[in-house]
Image (cartoon, coloured by chain):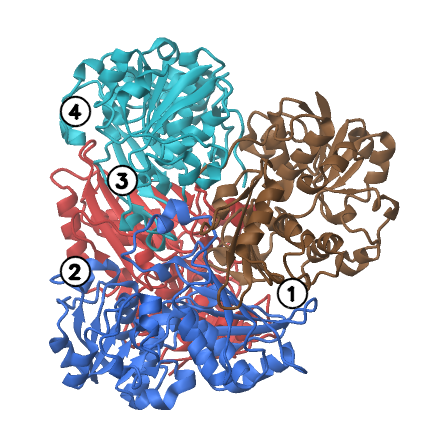
Chain colours: A blue, B red, C cyan, D brown
Amino acid sequence: MANVAIIGATGYGGVELIRLLHTHPQVRLSYLSSDTYAGQRVCDVYPHLAAVELPLEKRDPAAAGECDFVLLAVPAGGAMEVVPDLAEAGARVVDVSPDFRLREAALYPRWYKFEHTCPEFLREAVFGIPEWHREKIRSARLVAAPGCYPTAVLLALSPLVAEGLIEPNDIIVDGKTGISGAGRTSLRLDYHFPEADADVATYRVGGHRHLPEMVQELSGLAKAEVRIAFAPHLVPMARGILLTVYARPTAGSGAAELRDCLRSRYEGEPFVHVLPEGKWPHTKWATGTNNCFLAVGDDNSTGRVIVVSVLDNLGKGMAGQMVQCLNLMMGVEESTGLAVPAAYP
Amino acid sequence: MANVAIIGATGYGGVELIRLLHTHPQVRLSYLSSDTYAGQRVCDVYPHLAAVELPLEKRDPAAAGECDFVLLAVPAGGAMEVVPDLAEAGARVVDVSPDFRLREAALYPRWYKFEHTCPEFLREAVFGIPEWHREKIRSARLVAAPGCYPTAVLLALSPLVAEGLIEPNDIIVDGKTGISGAGRTSLRLDYHFPEADADVATYRVGGHRHLPEMVQELSGLAKAEVRIAFAPHLVPMARGILLTVYARPTAGSGAAELRDCLRSRYEGEPFVHVLPEGKWPHTKWATGTNNCFLAVGDDNSTGRVIVVSVLDNLGKGMAGQMVQCLNLMMGVEESTGLAVPAAYP
Amino acid sequence: MANVAIIGATGYGGVELIRLLHTHPQVRLSYLSSDTYAGQRVCDVYPHLAAVELPLEKRDPAAAGECDFVLLAVPAGGAMEVVPDLAEAGARVVDVSPDFRLREAALYPRWYKFEHTCPEFLREAVFGIPEWHREKIRSARLVAAPGCYPTAVLLALSPLVAEGLIEPNDIIVDGKTGISGAGRTSLRLDYHFPEADADVATYRVGGHRHLPEMVQELSGLAKAEVRIAFAPHLVPMARGILLTVYARPTAGSGAAELRDCLRSRYEGEPFVHVLPEGKWPHTKWATGTNNCFLAVGDDNSTGRVIVVSVLDNLGKGMAGQMVQCLNLMMGVEESTGLAVPAAYP
Amino acid sequence: MANVAIIGATGYGGVELIRLLHTHPQVRLSYLSSDTYAGQRVCDVYPHLAAVELPLEKRDPAAAGECDFVLLAVPAGGAMEVVPDLAEAGARVVDVSPDFRLREAALYPRWYKFEHTCPEFLREAVFGIPEWHREKIRSARLVAAPGCYPTAVLLALSPLVAEGLIEPNDIIVDGKTGISGAGRTSLRLDYHFPEADADVATYRVGGHRHLPEMVQELSGLAKAEVRIAFAPHLVPMARGILLTVYARPTAGSGAAELRDCLRSRYEGEPFVHVLPEGKWPHTKWATGTNNCFLAVGDDNSTGRVIVVSVLDNLGKGMAGQMVQCLNLMMGVEESTGLAVPAAYP
């Protein structure tokens, strides 16, 4: 039984962590911080968590650091403020902010508009996709869990790029996301129900902050510079991401080869499911879970292959993956607390 | 470890049962029948249940009857066809069809347009709301779990009627339901996405089939004839029920007394949550769970009290409640497999 | 051709007025004010109004007052600040704020938390439902158009109360509204897409500000005190209101009599449609239009009648009705600019 | 005043035509056919069209052919059955089925699984996008209006391909459509509200029937073979299409040049709106209208340009465009009956 802290416990990521960990047989939630609701209990802020009577406290790295593990569900720039103290206190950390995902400190001013204050941790941080970095995560002091879009892209493309099955410099990624990806405190007109309902729109074309971590990870596997054209879209649903990738297969390969590659790479993985030919995934299949669904098909007109990747932005794209990492770090069965499939429909 | 069968495993109720029981520590799913998909596996029909490779079989009461428990998730008229055989085989049954919910066989032709073929089971069947019939359920051979609307009404009103706090003959119930309540194979234009989205409509005013079981159960508690004006509405969401009850309090009572009554009646119940004054429940709080949320307020203009009841029509209104009954019948902790709160938002 | 001003042109009511009036053959939009967007053009703020290149100006009653007609689409308390100046300037006003809807100045501190600053206009203001006050509206200097809920209630119940067909002191109104009713600048968490989607909830039980105007108007017709239990609900759709009324018919009447009463009262009215027995309206039928649909049925269990009223909260519940009033005041055909039916689905 | 017939008047396209034409000042709806509802009136089938008391008749080309114009809103294969008779009767036709959109009769067996029965009309038919074939439409006997996806693609890409600003053989089109595109009588599980709500999914990858008409029209302009990778997606909204095009600009061009090209090509067009740099369109802007919104941006990572095209699949993608064509054929102002902007939100 491990003592676990959550910093940022009342955002959408934090509350999903509470949901998953409250009934986790190996976890005791020992410290929950919330800037907005400190002083209240979880069940007061979120009445649907009626059984979670735990108190919400002011952010205090010292108190959190007394726990065995600290889960950081804070916005960009919030994690680097507390990680050095937590590390010194001996806590092991899973961070879902972008603060430790990029290897190059110089990328932070460009993409996130801040100077990194503890770049010495960038080399140490383990990129938190268990399917690719399982062993390092087990012993890591600091895990940097990727964002929702990068997880969906990397699960789909890492095997293909690593095996040289697609051209690395001509990848198109069209993203469709549910609106919880924007967070809870971001009350912009774009997310106001009357405007967002029955609507689809493109946003941040070519400049989404999640792009550099996709490029970094894939380039490492490709041993070549990866180039991605990425346009994300807002879709009228609360949760879920569907990515449609249009890639150019290298000579001699096509959908069948790519599908085989994904199948053999993810065989035995409990959370990554490669669909048979002709089946395409629905975001709803993953809602509320840590599952990712992948499918591949040929485009006969252009010779491209189309790869579709689906997951829940708050599940495998956030809290689910953090719990999966935590399970590895604790040395318990990796799917503990994550095995219930989606409520459908 | 009990062997459990599900008859009607691929409707929305059946698939929710599979979801809850696949990871249930005391249950082995031993037999699943599906009229539509016999011969396929669960994971072929519902790819989001990728881990459930169990076969779907033709309906065969003899095979089902070899299990310790049989869960019936079939339409009206389907359960009475198999219950006698199952009983003879020695299986214990939880049925969510209406076939054994009404005490009077004569009500079936009137409300369901069929003659009951085994009325001798009507007296034996235990009405499947654990909060009200827990002890009888533990030892029952046949449990008749109520429908989604009646569960929501009965959890809210049973204590008030039993204690004589509201007038029994002047109850108004305005229901709002998500569309999964209509089932999966019912592909009517009313449920076609383009028509149902961004729309609210009243349906079956005064003649909803769920009315007689509400009246039967409340009248038994009231020791008087209960009369309910009930108008259900279709709301553009997949899951969830919210009922708004307008009742006339008896002399000397009001929202405070009614709330106290509900509180004391449901104290210690894991799935029924009475909200404090001024808080009103959201259907989303219950989505995917076995929880029910209740709230009470005064209407100062007319002196009526307003009672709101919220649950998931496929959770506490269907599969969740069936599992809760099953747990009681198996003699395991009542909330086994039902403790994870709602994924929010 | 009349010169028309809109004050509050960029809220949801204002933009709907622009939509309807931009192509109105008898109207020249001469002055549009917007506190938020003054200095920009309509097409800059709302790109879907690409053809409306009109400038948005600071609120200036003197400039507005030079127009023949002024439409006020401002929040509570905003109209009484400008009406005296507009009246002095000789402009005729249609106001959709509550500022001139209540006859008793003393009701404003109680329901709206402000003292009325020009109560002398309260007697003069004509309540803006053309189907009931057509002649007075034609010559009015100040029309106070009712809110969305009251319009839906009054169109349904006014004939029944006036004819003594229902008991006036035991009326239950259950309201379901789309979320645009909350306005555009109200970026509360309740209207944040991830929270509002797939959700239904009760709000402001017993205390909705629209209650007193319903009671005032119906009591005048009933010549008795009308009492209404009113609980509004938020439903996941952008537009539309559906009200379900549970009323007690007076001796000898029932749904058939009530339907006949509504039919004969609204015969020839272009915007009020009474449905035949057994048909119930959908909110979607009214979306984007000035139409109202009414239906009546018996509840056999309690002897009550159920009356359902449907309209678009921004159409007949707001901008459509304002234009209908404006047409009357201008002396043009009442349905000018309002005749196109709903886009369905 | 022209006599106009609609064949297929009660599908979603037909009912939208009725909506637009019922109040059209130059049109008399003289004949409406419906296979499903013959014998009823429009207002009985669609109560929201309460004012349209016109009868629905059995399909009878002779009766339709007596009208000046016939609008065909029938499924694939339904138009070629009646066009020869209509032509002989002297009626002029606007057809929105695919039956006369492809120049090569041989393409029909391949894409639509039928042999064309009157290929002699294929040469004569004018492709019904007024912005590109205005003069031919004015005098045409048979106009073949394109489908919703092709209209969105062709308005966006035709100028760019014609001017040689993008590479014709490496075009990626990612489509997102509302579900009304599937029609009304297609009650598949995919469109059942509980399954379609809160969900996004890819469908018919590489094999959508709309692909050949896109390729045909663009290839004609490019004077080279155009190749398009096209993956459509179903999005949980009733109406609207958003296409995201990833194209490779030819040497020396980029988003600025492409935007200028679109601007100058569509200057003065009432229904095509090119957005300024940095603005991206929302499908909701076009709902219920004949408008199309276009935007262009650079993808800095790959050097591609991203072009977004938005319209209403039942508006400019179907009925709106048919009315626009009809206006041209009648010789009236092209935007008659189409000028009201979208109801927002």
Provide the chain ID for the residue under circle 4: C
Callout 4 amino acid:
Leu
**Residue pointed to by mark 3:** B246
Q: Is residue A342 visible?
A: yes
Instruction: Say whether marks 2 and 3 touch (CB < 8 Å).
Output: no
- Distance from the alpha carbon under mark 4 to that under mark 3: 26 Å
Q: Name which quarter of the figure residue B334 lies in.
A: bottom left
Above or below for D119 versus B312: above
Q: Considering depth in this image, is A129 or C36 the residue closer to the camera?
A: C36
**Residue pointed to by mark 1:** D170
Callout 1 amino acid:
Asp
- Distance from the alpha carbon under mark 4 to that under mark 1: 68 Å
Provide the chain ID for the residue under circle 1: D
Q: Which mark is residue A37?
A: 2
Please tell me how crowded label 2 is: few (under 14), some (14-19), or many (20+) other residues with Cα within 10 Å.
some
Residue B63: where, in percent of width, then height? Answer: 53, 77
- Distance from the alpha carbon under mark 2 to that under mark 3: 34 Å
Callout 2 amino acid:
Tyr
Q: Are marks 2 and 3 on the same chain?
A: no
Instruction: Say whether marks 4 and 3 touch (CB < 8 Å).
Output: no
**Residue pointed to by mark 4:** C107
Q: Name which quarter of the figure residue C302 lies in.
A: top left
How many marks overall? 4
Provide the chain ID for the residue under circle 3: B
Secondary structure found at label 2: loop
Residue A276: where, in percent of width, then height? Answer: 60, 76
Left or right of A205, for residue D316: right
Residue C64: where, in percent of width, then height? Answer: 32, 20
Secondary structure found at label 1: loop
Q: Are marks 2 and 1 on the same chain?
A: no
- Quarter of the image that includes the C terminus of chain B: bottom left
